[in-house]
């Protein structure tokens, strides 16, 4: 318990330092992004991915972006984190570096920077040789924190039409993900039906009614 508390405190401090660097890169005061969180919340999640005999048939964690402000991920040396920057057409494996954290910006940080800093589009895969362990520390804003660009550069437009709370942003994200999953399921079912229909049409009439 003591170790977990100390780990959480250290990573909260690291996250605030990183947000400070990003704030300054936007031409804002050092505390700008941290203050925009109102009351920063932290969640530590330990993910265990057992080895899989057929890794090509499954995902450890589906493709997504984190909803919060910033995420600090500690990988073991097995690896399995992948990122994409072309909508999932190609995936880049993030090689583990001993003693280093992977820093992912979340949707909240992406919106606050008006898209200047991208939210990491990523997934996790498994392998057939080794199990994998990772520890993700999510830094999230308070539910009532306002989500809207803190600064808009000349010639740009805000990437959000209007401000919303983080709670509203999260609900919209979850609704969109559920709808996307529903559409993917329907498309897969339709594909299977088309395959079955094609098989039937290719058979002689005598076999169909046999």
Image (cartoon, rainbow, N blue to C red):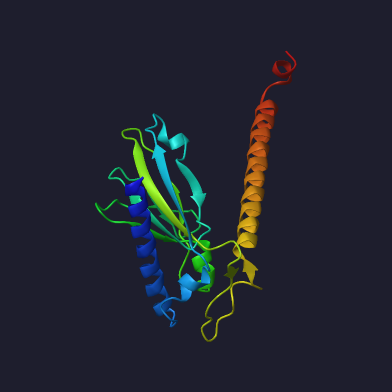
Name the quadrant of the N terminus.
top left
> Residue 155, relative to residue 208: is it above or below?
below
- In this view, the residue in front, 36 or 1, is 1
Name the quadrant of the C terminus.
top right
Q: Position of residue 62 (x, y in %)?
A: 50, 45
Q: Position of residue 154 (x, y in %)?
A: 52, 86
Q: Position of residue 14 (x, y in %)?
A: 35, 64
> Could one spot residue 144 in this view of the protein?
yes
186 displayed left or right of 29: right
For the point 45% across and 49% down, the residue is 123
- In this view, the residue in front, 51 or 17, is 17
For the point 49% across and 67% down, the residue is 109
83 displayed left or right of 182: left
- In this view, the residue in front, 87 or 179, is 179
Residue that extends furthest to the bottom in the rendered view of this protein: 154
Q: Position of residue 175 (x, y in %)?
A: 66, 52
């Amino acid at each position: 318990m003591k170790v977990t508390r100390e780990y959480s405190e250290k990573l909260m401090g690291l996250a605030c330092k990183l947000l400070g660097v990003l704030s300054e890169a936007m031409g804002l005061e050092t505390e700008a992004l941290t203050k925009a969180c109102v009351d920063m919340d932290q969640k530590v999640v330990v993910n265990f991915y057992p080895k899989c005999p057929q890794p090509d048939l499954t995902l450890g964690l589906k493709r997504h972006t984190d909803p919060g402000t910033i995420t600090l991920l500690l990988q073991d040396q097995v690896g399995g984190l992948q990122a994409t920057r072309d909508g999932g057409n190609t995936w880049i494996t993030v090689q583990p570096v001993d003693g280093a954290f992977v820093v992912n910006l979340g949707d909240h940080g992406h919106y606050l920077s008006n898209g200047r800093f991208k939210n990491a589009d990523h997934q996790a895969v498994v392998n057939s040789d080794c199990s994998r362990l990772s520890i993700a520390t999510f830094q999230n804003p308070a539910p009532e924190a306002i989500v809207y660009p803190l600064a808009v550069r000349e010639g740009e437009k805000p990437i959000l039409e209007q401000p919303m709370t983080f709670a509203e942003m999260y609900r919209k994200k979850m609704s969109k993900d559920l709808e996307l999953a529903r559409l993917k399921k329907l498309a897969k079912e339709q594909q299977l039906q088309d395959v079955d229909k094609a098989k039937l049409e290719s058979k002689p009439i005598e076999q169909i009614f046999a």
